[in-house]
Amino acid sequence: MKTDDIPLPNPDCPVCSHPQRVAGASMRELQASYEEIAVALQLDAGDVERHFTSCVKVISLNPEEVGTVEGSDQQLQVLLQNATELYHSSVLTGNYVSASSSLAVRLRCLAEIGRRGETRTKNRGELLSADPEDPDTWSPELARWVMAYQDGILSRLDAIKSRQTEEVNDGL
């Protein structure tokens, strides 16, 4: 997950510098057309369309990944993007209480993204340095994971064998 993927407002874009930019973003999430958003913000529809195609990165949440690490990463990116949007909109309207609150959320998102990146790097390093044939080279966390994985396989095999035995006994 990269924080560079969340674009900052473009000062030359009339929507990026509009005090009601969050209202426009909310309307877009609710499937409003570019023309409807342009009327609400009193801007040109071409500017609104350009904003949503050039300035805003769409982060789609995959329903199949809800509850997974990837889904959590996507939700964190959406939260970061929304906090960034709210921060800039709050500053444009002079609402500094809201701006500082959204900035705090943004900073917590960035800290969590950094923490997740460090954890992934550490885990990747542990995997690369571990010899699959020598458990003595495994970290305790990796050893627990491998053992749990193997136990899961063995329990599924036992369940299959039990069902097969029951089917054989029922057939006699």
Image: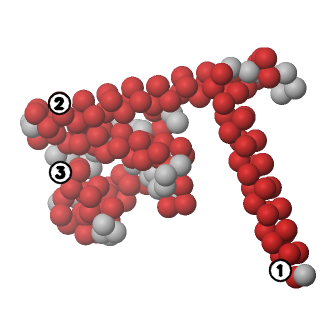
Residue 145's spot in the image, x, y percent? 67, 34
Residue type beneath disc 3: Gln
In the image, what residue occupies the spot 83% across and 80% down? 170
Query: What amino acid is found at the position of numbered circle 1 in the picture?
Result: Asp
The residue wearing badge 1 is 170
- Colour mapping used in the image: secondary structure
Q: CA distance from mark 1 to mark 2?
A: 69 Å
Residue 104's quadrant in the figure?
A: top left
Query: What's the CA distance linking mark 3 and mark 1?
Result: 71 Å
> Which residue is label 3 attached to?
20
What's under tag 2, amino acid-wise? Answer: Ser
Horizontal relation, residue 166 to residue 25: left or right: right
Contact flag, marks 2 and 3 (Cβ < 8 Å) = no
Distance from Cα at disc 2 to Cα at disc 3: 18 Å
User: Is residue 57 in view?
Assistant: no
Question: Which residue is found at the position 10% from the left and 33% from the top?
Answer: 97
Q: Position of residue 89 (x, y in %)?
A: 20, 42
Question: Upstream in the sequence, badge 2 or badge 3?
Answer: 3
Q: In front: 146, or 113? A: 146
Q: Earlier in the sequence, mark 3 or mark 1?
A: 3
Q: Is residue 119 visible?
A: yes
Q: Position of residue 169 (x, y in %)?
A: 86, 75
Q: Is residue 73 left or right of residue 129?
A: left
Split into 4 quadrants, where in the image is the C terminus?
Answer: bottom right
Q: Residue furthest bottom?
A: 171
Question: Which residue is tagged 2?
Answer: 100
Q: Check disc 3 and report its element: helix, strand or loop.
A: loop
SS label for mark 2: helix
Q: What residue is drawn where x is 26% and y is 63%?
A: 27
Q: Which one is nearer the viewer's eye here, 121 or 156?
A: 156
